[in-house]
Amino acid sequence: MEDAVAKSKVFTPEDLDPGPDEDELDDVRRLGRALAKERGTPALLDWDADLVGTLLDKLEQQGKMMSTLRADPSTSEEEHFRLVLVQTEMERAKWLVRSYVRARLHKIERYAQHIATTPELHARLSGGELAHARRYADLIARHYSSSVLDSLPEWLRRMDESSGGVSMVTKPNHAQPVLIYIRKDCGELVLDGDEVAELTKGSSHLVRYDLVERWVQLGWAEVL
């Protein structure tokens, strides 16, 4: 795996083209792309409040419209069939919202202590997510204290110990390899061993996340 990452395996655009640019997608497909990005990256990404809020508003409006049409005796059989199709799309959108929230919740709980004690990460979370991260970190700390740490000497009770160069706080592994698709030319990328990869539009690469994180954040590179 390390050799593959170091050499930045290159695919052709025909091998793995994830589709149109972000501004050409509807909200459901944009959320699907956000879910794939959240699942494919080791670090917690920014909470897309506008996208989720817009999609939830649309689902609420469509739900009310569906209820009205179903209760209307003048609604034809053909229109009822169309309502079934609309309901199917609504369920798909709801599944994407739940999956997106769960993917983020998994990271938040895994890195709760790191998130709670790192102020610069707080802007990436919604208010509810940040509150949950703090509560979860406190819950874990109290659990460890009551079950293990309180029985140890005082100097062994800290949960943020980093002696020997190994931190007890779980953090994202930014050196984890990710598969990316380049949507805008990003120039050259210097890899391990002074090798250079051309991040040209339409190409795909298997590289360490920390080397391309800024391009992923900008949307110039998409995690697959």
Image (cartoon, grey):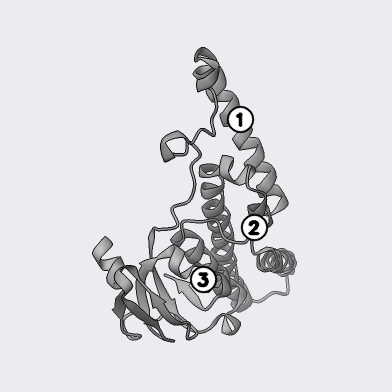
**Which residue is disc 2 drawn over?**
124
The picture quadrant where one finds residue 217 is bottom right
Neighbours of disc 2 within 10 Å: few (<14), some (14-19), many (20+): some
Q: Position of residue 99 (x, y in %)?
A: 53, 56
Three-letter amino acid code at the position of disc 3? Val
Q: Is residue 204 left or right of residue 57?
A: left
Can you say which quadrant of the picture contains the N terminus? bottom left
Q: Position of residue 59 (x, y in %)?
A: 68, 65
Question: Mark 2 or mark 3, which is nearer the start of the sequence?
Answer: 2
Sequence-wise first label, 3 or 1: 1
Residue at image position (70%, 48%) is 128
Residue type at tag 2: Arg
Residue sitting at x 63%, y 42%: 117
Q: CA distance from mark 3 to mark 2?
A: 14 Å
Q: Label 3, label 1: how many angstroms apart (C-alpha)?
A: 33 Å
What residue did someone put label 1 on? 139
Is residue 194 or residue 56 the one in the foreground?
194
Q: Pointers 3 and 1 in contact (CB under 8 A)?
A: no
Residue bearing mark 3: 216
For the image, the number of numbered tags is 3
The residue tagged with tag 3: helix, strand or loop? helix
Residue at image location 46% in from the left, 56% down from the top: 42
**Mark 3 vs 2: CB contact within 8 A:** no
The answer to whether 163 is drawn above or below residue 22 in the figure is above
